[in-house]
Image (cartoon, rainbow, N blue to C red):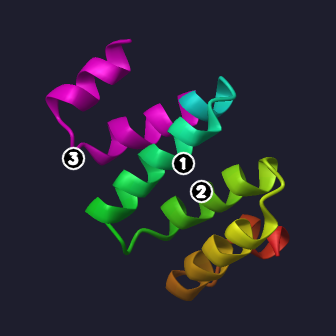
Amino acid sequence: ILLVKAVNNQPKNEQALFNLSVLYEIKGEFPKAINTLEKLISINPLNSEYYQTIGLFYLAQSHYSSAEKNFLKALQLNDNLIESKKGL
Protein backbone atom coordinates (compact mmCIF):
# COMPACT_ATOMS: atom_id res chain seq x y z
CA ILE A 1 0.00 0.00 0.00
CA LEU A 2 2.87 2.37 0.75
CA LEU A 3 4.33 1.69 -2.67
CA VAL A 4 1.00 2.54 -4.34
CA LYS A 5 0.90 5.79 -2.36
CA ALA A 6 4.45 6.59 -3.44
CA VAL A 7 3.51 6.06 -7.09
CA ASN A 8 0.38 8.16 -6.68
CA ASN A 9 2.46 10.98 -5.18
CA GLN A 10 5.23 10.65 -7.78
CA PRO A 11 3.68 9.06 -10.89
CA LYS A 12 6.92 9.34 -12.88
CA ASN A 13 9.16 7.80 -10.23
CA GLU A 14 10.67 4.98 -12.28
CA GLN A 15 12.06 2.99 -9.37
CA ALA A 16 8.76 3.06 -7.49
CA LEU A 17 6.84 2.05 -10.63
CA PHE A 18 9.28 -0.77 -11.37
CA ASN A 19 9.05 -2.07 -7.80
CA LEU A 20 5.26 -1.88 -7.98
CA SER A 21 5.23 -3.90 -11.21
CA VAL A 22 7.36 -6.60 -9.59
CA LEU A 23 5.09 -6.63 -6.54
CA TYR A 24 2.06 -7.11 -8.77
CA GLU A 25 3.84 -9.94 -10.61
CA ILE A 26 4.72 -11.67 -7.33
CA LYS A 27 1.07 -11.43 -6.29
CA GLY A 28 0.03 -12.96 -9.63
CA GLU A 29 -1.64 -9.76 -10.79
CA PHE A 30 -0.16 -9.89 -14.28
CA PRO A 31 -2.45 -7.33 -15.95
CA LYS A 32 -1.53 -4.75 -13.30
CA ALA A 33 2.15 -5.66 -13.58
CA ILE A 34 2.12 -5.26 -17.35
CA ASN A 35 0.11 -2.05 -17.22
CA THR A 36 2.62 -0.58 -14.76
CA LEU A 37 5.53 -1.56 -16.99
CA GLU A 38 3.80 -0.03 -19.99
CA LYS A 39 3.60 3.24 -18.02
CA LEU A 40 7.33 2.94 -17.37
CA ILE A 41 8.06 2.39 -21.04
CA SER A 42 6.03 5.50 -21.91
CA ILE A 43 8.15 7.47 -19.42
CA ASN A 44 11.47 5.99 -20.52
CA PRO A 45 11.23 4.08 -23.82
CA LEU A 46 15.00 3.55 -24.00
CA ASN A 47 15.31 1.41 -20.87
CA SER A 48 15.96 -2.11 -22.11
CA GLU A 49 15.32 -3.64 -18.69
CA TYR A 50 11.67 -2.59 -18.84
CA TYR A 51 11.16 -4.44 -22.12
CA GLN A 52 12.97 -7.48 -20.78
CA THR A 53 10.86 -7.51 -17.63
CA ILE A 54 7.56 -7.15 -19.47
CA GLY A 55 8.76 -9.94 -21.77
CA LEU A 56 9.35 -12.17 -18.75
CA PHE A 57 5.89 -11.36 -17.41
CA TYR A 58 4.31 -12.27 -20.76
CA LEU A 59 6.37 -15.45 -20.90
CA ALA A 60 5.12 -16.45 -17.45
CA GLN A 61 1.58 -16.20 -18.83
CA SER A 62 2.44 -18.19 -21.99
CA HIS A 63 1.87 -15.14 -24.20
CA TYR A 64 4.78 -16.07 -26.40
CA SER A 65 4.37 -13.60 -29.24
CA SER A 66 4.13 -10.63 -26.85
CA ALA A 67 7.11 -11.95 -24.89
CA GLU A 68 9.17 -12.36 -28.07
CA LYS A 69 8.31 -8.84 -29.27
CA ASN A 70 9.49 -7.34 -25.99
CA PHE A 71 12.64 -9.49 -25.78
CA LEU A 72 13.59 -8.40 -29.29
CA LYS A 73 13.04 -4.74 -28.40
CA ALA A 74 15.13 -5.18 -25.25
CA LEU A 75 17.96 -6.73 -27.27
CA GLN A 76 17.71 -3.99 -29.87
CA LEU A 77 18.46 -1.51 -27.08
CA ASN A 78 21.02 -3.70 -25.27
CA ASP A 79 22.32 -6.88 -26.86
CA ASN A 80 23.88 -8.10 -23.59
CA LEU A 81 20.62 -9.02 -21.85
CA ILE A 82 20.95 -12.71 -21.04
CA GLU A 83 17.33 -13.20 -19.91
CA SER A 84 16.03 -11.74 -23.17
CA LYS A 85 18.27 -14.08 -25.16
CA LYS A 86 17.09 -17.05 -23.09
CA GLY A 87 13.47 -15.99 -23.55
CA LEU A 88 13.77 -16.28 -27.31
Identify which amino acid the numbered label 3 is placed on.
Answer: Lys
Nearer the N terminus, badge 3 or badge 1? 3
Which residue is painted at 79% across and 48% down in the image?
60
Residue 72 x %, y %: 65, 82
> How far separated are the C-alphas under marks 3 and 1?
16 Å
Quadrant of the image occupied by residue 86 = bottom right
Q: Which residues are magenta?
A: 1-23
* Looking at the image, residue 76 lies above or below residue 17: below
Q: Is residue 11 magenta?
A: yes
Using a 10 Å C-alpha cutoff, classify the residue at mark 1 as few (fewer than 14 neighbours), some (14 to 19) or many (20 or more).
Answer: many
Using a 10 Å C-alpha cutoff, classify the residue at mark 2 as few (fewer than 14 neighbours), some (14 to 19) or many (20 or more).
Answer: many
The residue indicated by pointer 2 is 54
* Magenta span main SS: helix
Most extreme residue toward the left is 9
| Contact (Cβ within 8 Å) of mark 2 with mark 1 | yes
The residue indicated by pointer 1 is 34
Quadrant of the image occupied by residue 2 = top left
> How far separated are the C-alphas under marks 2 and 1?
6 Å
* Looking at the image, residue 55 lies above or below residue 48: above
Residue 8 x %, y %: 22, 28
* Looking at the image, residue 67 lies above or below residue 72: above
- Secondary structure of the residue carrying numbered label 1: helix
Using a 10 Å C-alpha cutoff, classify the residue at mark 3 as few (fewer than 14 neighbours), some (14 to 19) or many (20 or more).
Answer: some
- Secondary structure of the residue carrying numbered label 2: helix
Which of the labelled discs sits on residue 80, or is there none?
Answer: none
The residue indicated by pointer 3 is 12
Identify which amino acid the numbered label 1 is placed on.
Answer: Ile
* Looking at the image, residue 14 lies above or below residue 77: above
Quadrant of the image occupied by residue 36 = top left
In this view of the protein, which residue sits in the foreground, 77 or 38?
38
Which residue is painted at 31% across and 63% down in the image?
42
Identify which amino acid the numbered label 2 is placed on.
Answer: Ile
